[in-house]
Image (cartoon, helix red, strand yellow):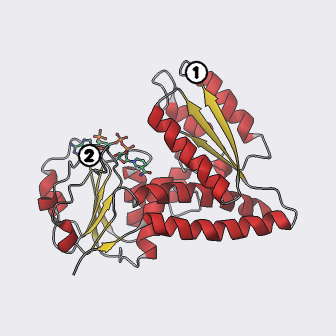
Amino acid sequence: MPALVLDGKVLAKSREQQLKTVIDQLVSEGGRKPALATILVGDDPSSATYVQMKINACGRVGMGSQSIAMPASTSTEELLAEIHRLNNDPKVNGILLQHPVPDQIDERACFDAIALEKDVDGVTTQGFGRMAMGEHAFGSATPAGIMTLLKHYDIVIEGKHAVVVGRSPILGKPMAAMLLNANATVTLCHSRTIDLATLVRQADIVVGAVGQPELIKAEWIKDGAVVIDAGYHEGGIGDIEKTGLESRVSALTPVPGGVGPMTINTLISQTLESVQRNLM
Ligand code: NAP
């Protein structure tokens, strides 16, 4: 049987329709339009594209956006001042600081300056800690989007061996915590891992989050596994080599159109949730 395609593009589109309905109703009842503030520091073209895609998604669901562009020479203090301003702006419900920021900026300090209730991209240390402990927090957008995708397609996580390759604070680490909270047995791999191939061969669920084209080889992946590829490289290549996988794994995410749309969808869903939590 061919692998089930975990289609993030289709799921994100249907979830956008639901978000639009809720936001339209909120506004028609006299509520303020939810709004996401985006901060882009520097002139990296890929980052600019990602931010624009997020702003476009806000527009599609009737959400407001405030787009802040800061020069590549911005200091940590200047960025912190902007984040504090947005924290105190009642018209802003969520804050996205596009990663990565230029080297001279202390990115962790800036992420952690985002108010917890506006941390809709799930990047703060406090949010991560709460999420890992099973308390409410906005999850880091990419792994939280992956969890939504797995749930939508009824992929069984409990009891499965999940192997996550990559341990970044925004992706691999929170992914491992979310899978653990969903009762998977989790192995978290990174650049110092010895014999990655042997570990990936044991995976019922494998998550590629390394940022290197096809680093994870198709022949390492066992028959019937669930394959989640967070990577995107030029030419539609992911972090996982797909040759022959379609006919022998149980499910896989396409690249593009799998994880990426779910990241954006999670960001805007969590921005709306931030408004709803404030109304409660
Ligand atoms: P990152 O911060 O560069 O982290 C890469 C991780 O991969 C690190 O933990 C690193 O280990 C590990 N790694 C590097 N080489 C390895 C090797 N040879 N063997 C095993 N592990 C290795 O990247 P990221 O931000 O997490 O992103 C990872 C991927 O996801 C990228 O392709 C990125 O484009 C993609 N991504 C997609 C979305 C989306 O919305 N679709 C969002 C975010 C990221 P060490 O910790 O030991 O250095």
At label 2, which amino acid type do we have? His
Q: Earlier in the sequence, mark 1 or mark 2?
A: 1
Measuring from the top left, give residue 6's x and y in whole percent.
Answer: 37, 69
Q: Residue at x 62, y 22 (%)?
A: 77
Measuring from the top left, give residue 64's x and y in whole percent.
Answer: 72, 50
Q: Is mark 2 within 8 Å of ligand 1?
A: yes
Q: Label 2's element?
A: loop
State the residue in front, 104 or 16.
16
Image position of 50 with respect to 29: above or below: above
Measuring from the top left, give residue 224's x and y in whole percent.
Answer: 21, 75
The residue furthest bottom is 1
Residue position marked by numbered label 1 in the rendering: 74
- Asked if the residues shown at circle 1 and circle 2 are in contact, with their CB atoms under 8 angstroms apart, the answer is no
Q: Quadrant of residue 89?
A: top right
Report the number of discs.
2
Q: Residue at x 40, y 59 (%)?
A: 257
Distance between the Cα atoms at labels 1 and 2?
A: 31 Å
Q: Quadrant of the C terminus?
A: bottom right
Residue position marked by numbered label 2 in the rendering: 190
